[in-house]
Image: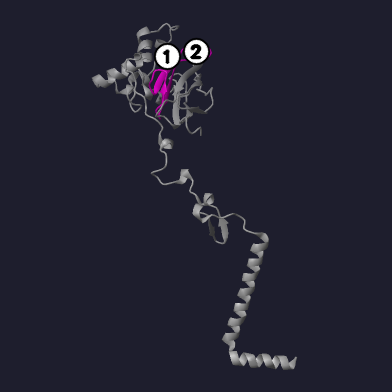
């Protein structure tokens, strides 16, 4: 053993420490290559790679071309479809469709009655509603007053519910506070009201009621239920905020209709 150790030291002295290190490194590399070669021969390739088809080895992993192909949805902007952006156009309104649209046309053409065009303005009738004049069963009933009130669409009426006080009931929702519809569909919104008295529904995010406007005033039925049919047409999407209020009841009801473009289903 001593002779072998001496022989090794002599060899080391002749070659030098660097030559010896290189020799050991070369030996280790050759062993690794032989091991990899044996593994490849014994296990075989995982895939039949075809360079002509775009197959390649990435990070030592064999990858077929289909793994590397870009998804069409993530392709360049020029190749992407813009369908997901298309929520449609808001349909026009036939101004002679009904009494309410004619009232809006009158406000536009004459420059009068701004309360019919914006919720930021309220008429004197909205500020000081007279339930007796509106109620056909009342001794003070005024038919012209009632007809004029129902004919004139005023979105700002929702800002003037009755003041809380003795004998004044609070308006309550009778339908879900959040409803989801697809464009082109409709939903019926219901709130509690005073039988025979008006309730106004106003949308602040497009859509339309049966009168083709974003506001409508209806009369509560004998059971005290006031309902309005809301449509989610083309051009209306996402959350639509709707408020309902009555001049003879305190408080307001806030409802949300979520309108979804038909091609997403989300």
Residue 3 image offset from top left, x and y in percent? 73, 93
Q: Name which residue lies at 50% across and 54% down.
A: 52
Residue at the left extreme of this rendering: 110
| Mark 1 nearby-residue class (10 Å; few <14, some 14–19, many ≥20) | some
Q: Does the magenta-highlighted stretch encompass residue 197?
A: yes
Q: Nearer the viewer, residue 19 or 76?
A: 19
Judging by the rendered image, the residue that carries numbered circle 2 is 221
> Mark 2 or mark 1, which is nearer to you?
2
Horizontally, residue 91 falls left or right of residue 25, namely left
Looking at the rendering, in which quadrant would you find the N terminus? bottom right
- What kind of element bears circle 2? loop
Q: Quadrant of residue 261?
A: top left
SS for tag 1? helix
x, y percent for residue 239: 46, 32
Point out the tag, 2 or 1, that comes first from the N-terminus: 1
Color style of the picture = one colour
Measuring 40% from the left and 34% from the top, which residue is drawn there? Answer: 86
Q: Nearer the viewer, residue 211 or 142?
A: 211
Counting from the top left corner in percent of width and height, residue 40 is at 64, 63
Please tell me which residue is depicted at 54% across the width and 26% down the height of the picture. 176
Q: Provide residue 200's location: percent of width, then percent of height.
A: 42, 20
Q: Would you say residue 76 sits in the magenta stretch?
A: no
Query: Disc 2 to disc 1, how far (Cα)?
Result: 15 Å
Number of on-image labels:
2
Q: Relative to residue 259, is residue 45 drawn left or right?
A: right
Task: Establish if 50 lies above or below 8.
Answer: above
> Which residue is under mark 1?
131
Given residues 83 and 18, the one toward you in this image is: 18
Q: Which residues are magenta?
A: 196-223
Give the answer, above or below, for where 139 lies relative to 94.
above
> In which quarter of the view is residue 243 placed?
top left
| Residue at the limit of the structure toward the right, as seen here | 1
């Amino acid at each position: 053993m001593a002779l072998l150790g001496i022989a090794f030291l002599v060899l080391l002295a002749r070659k030098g420490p660097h030559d010896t290190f290189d020799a050991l490194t070369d030996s280790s590399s050759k062993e690794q290559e032989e091991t990899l070669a044996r593994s490849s021969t014994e296990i075989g390739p995982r895939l039949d790679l075809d360079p002509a088809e775009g197959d390649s080895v990435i990070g030592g992993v064999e990858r077929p071309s289909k793994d590397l192909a870009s998804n069409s949805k993530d392709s360049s902007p020029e190749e992407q479809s813009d369908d997901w952006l298309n929520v449609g156009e808001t349909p026009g309104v036939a101004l002679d469709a009904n009494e309410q649209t004619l009232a809006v046309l009158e406000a536009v053409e004459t420059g009068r009655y701004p309360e019919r065009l914006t919720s930021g303005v309220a008429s004197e009738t909205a500020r000081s509603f007279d339930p007796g004049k509106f109620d056909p069963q009342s001794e003070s009933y005024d038919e012209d007053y009632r007809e004029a009130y129902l004919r004139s669409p005023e979105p700002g009426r929702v800002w003037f519910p009755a003041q809380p006080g003795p004998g004044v009931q609070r308006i309550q929702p009778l339908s879900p506070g959040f409803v989801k519809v697809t464009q082109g569909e409709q939903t019926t919104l219901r709130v509690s009201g005073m039988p025979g008295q008006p309730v106004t529904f106003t949308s602040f995010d497009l859509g339309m009621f049966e009168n083709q406007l974003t506001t409508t005033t209806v009369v509560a039925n004998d059971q005290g239920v006031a309902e309005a049919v809301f449509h989610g047409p083309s051009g209306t999407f996402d959350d639509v905020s709707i408020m309902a209020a009555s001049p003879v009841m305190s408080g307001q009801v806030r409802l949300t209709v979520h309108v979804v473009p038909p091609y997403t289903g989300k």
